[in-house]
Amino acid sequence: MDQITEIGTILEWYLSVGVDEALADAPIDRFETSKQVLARGTPPVAERRASPASAPASAPSPGLSPRREAIPPGPSAAEAAIAANAREIAAACDDFAALEAAIRAFEGCPLKAGALNTVIADGTFGAELMLIGEAPGADEDRLGKPFVGRAGQLLDKMLAAIGRDRARDAYIANILFWRPPGNRKPDPVETASCLPFIERLIELSKPKVIVLLGATPTSTLLGLGDGITRLRGRWRDWHGIPAMPMLHPAYLLRQPPAKREAWHDLLAVRHRLLD
Ligand code: URA
């Protein structure tokens, strides 16, 4: 095999396993980083429970039932410092324009360096229904809008099925504002750095109902660690706002029979919106 063919074969292999961006000259072992983060201690549950961006970090979260056994290990000191800084910045934002500018200027999330765009939200700020996914994928990163790829197209159809138009009747965002390379799961530092901003976005937009699309927003915002297939379909409470964990549209694309459960949950959401 000549050198060019060999390089081509290696690149093809990278693509096939989801490595589709060159971010740095040297590789970073994310498994090692996560192991280190997890090894750095576990603060008390009350500290770990995410409070909205405008509340002091130690404030109890109203309405969230304590599920100690299900909460993942807590933040390291570095993670806590980044999160505290993000919370301070987010809390100082009193409207969407200020928050948007603050998110765009924020340098505390390591993913920003490798992303093409900052992806904040789509739809109508202030809509009754707010949907929160995990993180931008390749299409979202390219276009700077959440849920515009295949999963987003399915999401549009799901919304249409309950009489909601994505642009007019919904507000759509993600836990992360920057794409994780290769669409890998966000790590705890990335999540902690974005959380205060997404919480502030929810607070400012004041939805009547929140839909949590998949495991990441469910565990991050509600502190529930059980699998999404067990958590979906039951109303929870996010600081006084009803929140419905649902299966992620990307999962529904891979597992079409699960659309039955999604339909059940969507009907519950429609019902709640009409209350
Ligand atoms: N998946 C998500 O969770 N969010 C997006 O924006 C796109 C796909």
Image: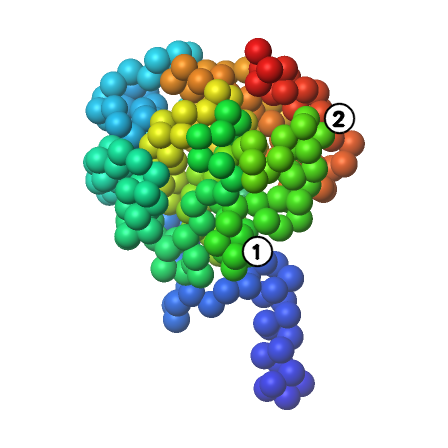
Q: Nearer the viewer, residue 224 or 243?
A: 243
Query: Which residue position holds label 2?
Result: 260
272 over 194 or under it: above or below: above
Q: Is residue 228 left or right of residue 96?
A: right
Query: Which residue position holds label 1?
Result: 139
First in residue order: circle 2 vs circle 1: 1
Quarter of the image with the N terminus in it: bottom right
Q: Amino acid at mark 1?
A: Asp
**Is ligand 1 less than 8 Å from the beta carbon at label 2?**
no
So how many labels did they put on this image?
2
Q: Quadrant of residue 228?
A: top right
Q: What residue sits 51% from the left and 21% below the top? A: 209
Q: Nearer the viewer, residue 113 or 12?
A: 113
Quarter of the image with the C terminus in it: top right
**Where does the image place residue 140, in percent across and percent down from the top left?**
53, 52
Q: What residue sits 66% from the left and 48% below the top? A: 150
Look at the image and tell me whether residue 44 can be seen.
no
Q: Are dots 2 and 1 in contact, CB under 8 Å?
A: no
Image quadrant of ligand 1 equals top right
Secondary structure beneath dot 1 equals helix
Secondary structure beneath dot 2 equals helix
Q: What residue sits 26% from the left and 27% below the top? A: 54
25 over 152 or under it: above or below: below
